[in-house]
Amino acid sequence: MNLRPTALVLALVLTYARYAEAQATPKKSLDYVGQLAAGTALFDGVDEAGEDTSVSCIPNAVVLFFPVIDTSVAGYGSKKIGPRWQEISPLHRVRPGAPPTILFHGSGDTVTPFSGAKTFRDAMVKAGNRCELVVDEGGQHGYLYRDRGHYEDALRRTEAFLASLGFRGGPGRP
C-alpha cells in the first residue's frame, strides 16, 4: 500500500481525469488525494509483498485540504474500513521525522471533523514535526472551492510554506 512516486502521480492524474470526465464535485477527488498524500508520508510497513521499496514514497512536504485525517469512530470512515481502521488513519500513524505539513480545515466541517485536524496538528508537533494548521472559522467541508478569495489565500499560504522549506518556482519564477 506504500505507493511509489510514479503510482502517486498516476493516482493524481487519474483522480483529476475522472473529475473532468464525470464533472463531479472537486471535494471528493481532492479529499481522496489528501488522504493519499498523508498516507504516503505516514503509512510505513503496509507495503504489499514483492513491492519495490528501494524508492521512497515519502514526500518532502505535505499540503492537505480538509482531508480524512482520523479514521476512528470520532473521525470519518471507521464503519467503512472496519476493524483495521487504525492502519490507514494518518492521525494514528504520526511519528517523529514526518515531512513538514500544512493543513487547511474549516472549523465547521462535519464531513471530516475539525477536531481531527487539531488533534493531528498537536500530535505532529508533539512528535517534533512541523505542522501548520490554517483554520477557516465556521468553514464547511470544501470551503476553499466555493470562494475564490479563500482558494487564492490558500495558494499564497501554500507557496509561502513551500518557500520556507527551500522549494522554489511557481508560475514565471525560477
Image: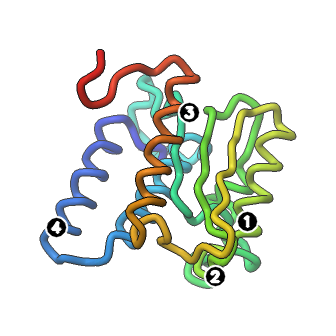
Q: Position of residue 122 (x, y in %)?
A: 82, 49
Mark 2 vs mark 3: in front: 3
Q: Secondary structure at mark 3?
A: helix
Residue density around tag 4, few if under 14, some if 14–19, many if 20 or more, within 10 Å: few
Determine which residue is flagged by label 1: 116
Q: Which mark is residue 110?
A: 2
Horizontal side, residue 6 vs residue 95: left or right: left
Q: Earlier in the sequence, mark 2 or mark 1?
A: 2
> Mark 4 highlights which residue?
20
Q: Within 10 Å of the Cα at label 1, are there few (<14), some (14-19), or many (20+) other Cα atoms?
A: many
- Residue at coordinates 76% horizontally, 69% vertically from top-left? 115
The residue wearing badge 3 is 161
| Residue 29: quadrant of the picture | bottom left
Mark 2–mark 1 distance (CA, rounded to whole Å): 11 Å
User: Label 3 vs label 1: CA separation?
Assistant: 21 Å
Going from N to C along the chain, the mark reached first, 2 or 4, is 4
